[in-house]
Amino acid sequence: MRMCRTKESLTLKARYIIATGRKMSGLVRLTRCVSGVQQQLAGAGAGAARARQLSTGQGQRQDEIKRVTVIGGGLMGSGIAQVAAESGREVRLVDVSQAVLEGARGRIHRSLSRLASKQFRDDKEAMERFVSDTLQRIQYSEDAEGSVSTSDLLVEAIVENMEVKKQLFSKLDKAAHKNTIFASNTSSLSITEMAASTERMDRFGGLHFFNPVPVMKLVEVVRTGETSDATFDSLMGFVMAVKKHPISCKDTPGFVVNRLLVPYLAEAVRLLERGDASARDIDTAMKLGAGYPMGPIELLDYVGLDTTKFILDGWSKMDPANPLFKPSATLNRMVEEGKLGVKSGEGFYSYKKNKS
């Protein structure tokens, strides 16, 4: 898509204005290029006022987020830490397991090396400097309280379990500075319920990144009824600072992407359960018939059968009468058997290296 004749696309200010739907005479052609995104974000409400605050210096600006603590050293947490460090932020990646942290360190190094080889293909010195500088901005720690005490932003990326998340936020709420913004990377759980476990509901929101974080451009910025304008501004600005594209969403089950995606995945499993079509044919149908890059059964394996199961279970408890949220007996059985998809080596398909 032909979009801009600016240098690296947009300034943070201009990108914020576009993301929140405000038009300016000097950006008319540019806003037309992203009109689809504007329509998606039309419900942001106070977007124009927020953009004016950024342009006049009122409220909390995105450049105040300079120190970021990420809790959880898994795929999502390490990815968030990487993109934050790439953008010049000082990052602390925290996990209770030193082994997990070592795994994250290696994963980030490999990811940065791949990225640098593409960006600086003909400049080995620039390649090495990019990797080295980014890695130096990331510290690894098992001390969550100590790490968050000097942070501007805390991003939680741990297991999708509401009680565990609430216990974590309640504990860190006491250790963090009063102005520190808290955010969860949850894909489906209530941000409002998490925020209620703290004394900073106005400084709490959702930042739902997508896997793999260094590659996927979208971030859902989730705003509760208590999230302040300044917090929302800072979260939107932070997302753009790490070169992602934010969309704004209310605190509704599944937000935007998963609210549409998970029922689609669940219906694919029901087709399979009824014997209407094979897994391979279901995937082929959606790839060749709908133009999707990956079929729903393949995507379930990639996302993780346990993740999809937990989402459906949680939604079903909130709204048991909704047929879209009905738990899947097949997913329940496969998760019990340890068949979680790609990460376990087997799901609906086998990913074992030594398969015959």
Image (tube, rainbow, N blue to C red):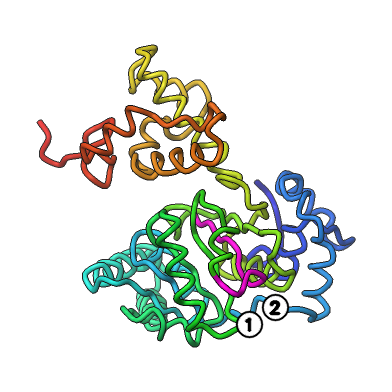
In the depicted structure, whether residue 209 falls above or below residue 234: above
Q: Which of 267 and 11 is in front in this view?
A: 267
Q: What stretch is highlighted in magenta?
A: 198-209
Q: Which mark is residue 61?
A: 2
- Report whether residue 118 is seen: no
User: Residue 214 location in percent, x, y?
Assistant: 45, 60
Q: Which mark is residue 64?
A: 1
Q: Nearer the viewer, residue 290 or 40?
A: 40
Q: Which residue lies furthest to the right in this view?
A: 25
Q: Nearer the viewer, residue 300 or 213?
A: 300
Check if mark 1's residue and mark 2's residue have beta carbons within 8 Å: yes
Measure the C-alpha gap from mark 1 to mark 2: 6 Å
The amino acid pointed to by label 1 is Glu
* Residue ID at (41%, 40%): 308
Q: Characterize the local packing of mark 1: few (<14), some (14-19) or many (20 or more) Cα atoms within 10 angstroms.
A: few
| In magenta segment, residue 221 | no
Find numbered disc 2 in the image and state the secondary structure of the residue it sits on: loop
* Residue 66 shown left or right of residue 118 in the figure: right
* Residue ID at (53%, 56%): 208
Find numbered disc 1 in the image and state the secondary structure of the residue it sits on: helix
* Residue ID at (39%, 25%): 269
User: Residue 176 location in percent, x, y?
Assistant: 51, 82
User: Residue 328 location in percent, x, y?
Assistant: 39, 29
In the depicted structure, whether residue 218 falls above or below residue 303: below
| Image quadrant assignment for residue 123 | bottom left
| In magenta segment, residue 202 | yes
- Report whether residue 214 is seen: yes
* Residue 44 shown left or right of residue 349 in the figure: right
